[in-house]
Every structure is written in structure tokens, then in C-alpha cells.
Amino acid sequence: MALGLPNWFVMTFKVLACDFDGTLASEGQIGPSALEAIEKARQAGLKVILVTGRTFFELTRVCERLDLFDAVVAENGAVLYFPRNAMIRDQGPAPPTRLLNELDQRGISYQVGRAIVGTSRADERGVREALEAAGVNRELVYNRAALMLLPVGIEKGQGVEHVLRSFGLSFQDALALEDAENDLALFEACAWAACPGNAIPELKARADWVFSGENGESVAVAITGSIIEGRLPARHSPRHRIAVGWVVETSEPATIPARDVNVLIYGDPLSGKSWLAGALVERLLAARYAICVLDPEGDYRVLADLPSVIWAEVCDRAALVRALTQFARDAAGCLVVDLSALPHPQKLQMIRAGLQWIRESRRRSGLPHWVLLDEAHYSLHRDGVADDVIGIEDKGFCLATYRPSWLRDSVVKQLDVFILAHATADDELAFLRSRLSNGAITFVATPRETTHVRHLRKYADSRVPFGERFLFRRPDGHVVAEAQSLHDFRRVLMTVDDHVIAHHARLGDFSRWVLDVFSDPELARQLKKTEARWRRGEVPDLRRAIDRLITFCYGTGA
């Protein structure tokens, strides 16, 4: 298998989670440039969350513009505040009075919030003694020179996760801006992290992006420049890549960017392209990306065996909309839209409606992050679904096809990553070579969690009863040959006249016989697809295509 990669890509976000002290604020104040940057971020459609270890009451004293934020996570995650409706929500209990009494007896200065107690790091020994004497269980969290006493299990990341859920957004769309020890938990709540140059070394080592400067001035420049414009150079971060296999020459992981690219998976029929596409879905799902699979032929139902995957057989527009609304309930789930029961013209209508709904949803919430469109040449050809419906320039598309040359130029120009399975069609390979700007690498694919089970050979040579034999007929009904087993069927298939094969393919006889006689729904489904493709003129050598299908499912000895 071969892999072609882009030179670069951009990042876009829906949420900024900004730390207060040392990040947005300098000496407890958010400067004019930082305030202006927040306003511009909101105007650009971003949600902005203010995150701080300060007590909520103290924050209201030092920050006069809480109204600029969509949400506030205060007291290191113990208090949530939503300025739009002035709603405040405590995530933990108030400090016990006996703990405060013990601190008073030891002469330890402290600040009391709705749930937090803030002291100096220099008083840590006395604080521990007070906790033991009071019999109170509190977690100690460091924040530069400060020490915070928090209810067990409370942290900034947890508070941000609550806010993201309330907005119906995914952590994959959130960028954290932070600078100190207590900000490390934000890595779990926000998939992406950035920090100013004055952040602690541990944060800088783990951040996806370190921007120059300090405090609010540098953050303002970062927000109004690279972040809003989507120029965050996250391609350098190995944390946000998806492994698709191992490079043959070096055994190193073969990876692709996890966001903001479009992927083409190409291969001959039965080459494993759907298997590769399914493997990519599995890995994206494990990384907590939301994915929608538009499945015209029913190849991805097996993914329903995985947690957080919903499979829906769609027969009309109402069922399609009901299925797609699942992303409002699960911002990190996968939906497989099975269109295989529909005739071809209706499949195209459902794909068009689905892509339009997805584009509008992405503009609102960023979900789903990825769209896998199988058999993409059916719907994205020159006269297919319009560009303004697809929104392929928004990135996050994986197109699987055995006919990439049928894709129109406006679609091909938006492709960034090319994954090639077994490919032998000279015209298709020439088409792809003309569009690949970088060299390709050869890789071995990683194993899948869900697999297409190859069928057993037990019926391949066994003879069927007389009334279940396949009778090869001419269009006038005259029988020219018969098959008593799959072995016989393959042998006769390679010798009868073309008009005999064409007669049965037009009627769908091959797929019907396999389903009725051998009770093999997977082989029957693949034969039905092949018959339909032949009727549309997409399969030039039908007998070879059918022979390959049987060989693939039952082995070369069939």
C-alpha cells in the first residue's frame, strides 16, 4: 500500500479555553489588546472560556468584563459561571468550617471561595497539618507560588469538559491557552494546547504550539493572528496524527494528520480499500473524533460492533435527518448511514441531502469532524452533488473509490492525502500520478478491530440438490450448461458465451442463486453490487469480476 502526504495543513477551532493569570492577564488585569482579541474571536464565531484558579468572588473583583466570555471555569474547576444568563453552578462542596478553624489556629493566611481554599505554597507543611487535624480530605494543587485546597476530583479540565458538553461541542475542537502547573489537566479536556514563552518548562514541552512573548500582549497577537486565521502549525505535533500502518523500509509508523485534510483511498475492486477506510474510521473514533459514514453499498455495518457507533438503515429523508441528529447527543461518536436498500437514483438524493445537512451542522458546531463517503465517484463526478453542497474545502473528508478519474477537478484539487491499496488500472494510476506532488511511501496496514470475515470453503466443492443447480440459459430460455457447485459455476462461467452472462446479470440471477442456495449474504451482496456496476457500464469484464469475487471469498481452491 502507498501513502502520499501533504506538505502542510491548517487548523481551525470552535473553542478557546484561556487561562487567566499569566496568560490573558498581567498582574491580575486583562489589558486592552487582550480584550480586543477576545472580542474578535467571538466575532469570528469562536466560543471563549475563561479558566482560572482564583476564587469566583475575587475574579469578579479583578475582571470587569466577564460578559466577554461564553463561560467561566473558576476555582480550578469547582465553579462554573455562564455570563449570558448569570447562571452559577458549584461543582464541589464549600470548605468545612473546622478546616478553616485549624488554618486560623496556625496563623495561615488564606482566601475562601465557594469551594476552594487558596493559600501560599510556603505554608504547605502547616496546611497538611491542618487537614490532618480537621480530618478533612482535600487535594493540594500547585499554581506557581500559590497552593490550592480542592475537593477530591475537582480540576480545571473537568470543568471545561462540563462546559463543552453544555455547548454540544467536542474536546477535539478546543484549544487551551495556559501557562502553569494546574493547567496540565486541560490537556485532557482540550485536544490542542498552546502556551506563551513564559510558561513552565513542563507545559512548553507538552504544548502543540509555543508562541513568543508573555502574558496578555502575546496571547492577543496569537489569537488575532494564527488562531483566528487557522494558521496554527499543528502539523509539527506528533500527538495529532493517526497511524495507518508501518513503513516497509524502516518499520516506522506511517501516519496522516488527524484534522483539516481530505483523504482519498483508492484501489481496485476487492483490493481492500473499504477495509482501509474502515480501519481509518476505527482509529479516528479511538481518538474521540466524530465521524459520519455515508455507505451506499452496505460495506460498513460491521463497525456497529464498536462502542459509540450507531448504524442506521436509511430509506427516506426523515430517517436520514433522525440519524444525523445523533451528533447533538454524542460529540465523539460515529454514525453509519446505510443506503444499500435504495435504488441508485435515491441513493444520490440521500447523499446530497446528507452532505448538505452535514455542511450546515459543521458551520454551527464543527460536527462531525470527518465524513467518509464510499463509492465517491457515484456522487462527486462532473454532474454530481454541487460543490456548495459538499463543502469539501472545509476539509475532513475521506473519499473511497475505485474510479478516482471520475471525480471532478474541483474535488480532486481539495485532496491532501492519497492512500492506495492494490491498484492495477493504468489509466487510474496515470490520473493519480499527475496529481501527486510529493513522493509516496509504501506501508503495511495496521490490523483492524472489526474485520470482514472471509467465508469458509465448505460449500465450494459440495454438490447441491438437483432443483438448486444453476442453469445457464440464453435469453430465449434455452439451457446451455448447469452448475452443481461453486467450483462448477466458476468453470462454466469462464466458458459460456457473453450474451448468456449478460442475460443473467441483467436479471440479478447470480447474486440471487448464491443467497438462496448457499445462504451466503456477504458474497450475494458483493455479487449484487457487481451486477449493478456492470449494468451501469462500470465493469468491462463481468465474468472475471465474478470469478475474482468467488476466489476472494472461498479461496483459490474453489
Image (cartoon, rainbow, N blue to C red):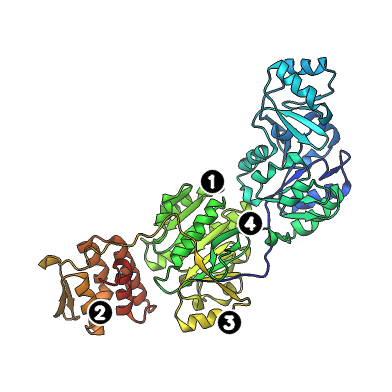
* Residue 379 position within the rendered picture, expressed as x and y whole percent measured from the top left: 48, 69
As drawn, the label of residue 434 is 3
Element on which disc 2 rests? helix
CA separation, marks 3 and 4?
Answer: 29 Å
* Residue 531 position within the rendered picture, expressed as x and y whole percent measured from the top left: 32, 73
**Label 3: few (<14), some (14–19) or many (≥20) C-alpha neighbours in 10 Å:** few
Query: Sequence-wise, which precedes: disc 1 or disc 4?
Result: 4
* Residue 205 position within the rendered picture, expressed as x and y whole percent measured from the top left: 74, 51
As drawn, the label of residue 501 is 2
User: Mark 3 or 2, which is nearer the eye?
Assistant: 3
**Label 2: few (<14), some (14–19) or many (≥20) C-alpha neighbours in 10 Å:** many
* Residue 217 position within the rendered picture, expressed as x and y whole percent measured from the top left: 87, 50
Q: Which residue is mark 1?
A: 330
Element on which disc 3 rests? loop
Near-viewer residue (250 or 134): 250
Near-viewer residue (352 or 550): 550
Q: Residue at position x 60%, y 77% from top? A: 436
CA separation, marks 1 and 4?
Answer: 21 Å
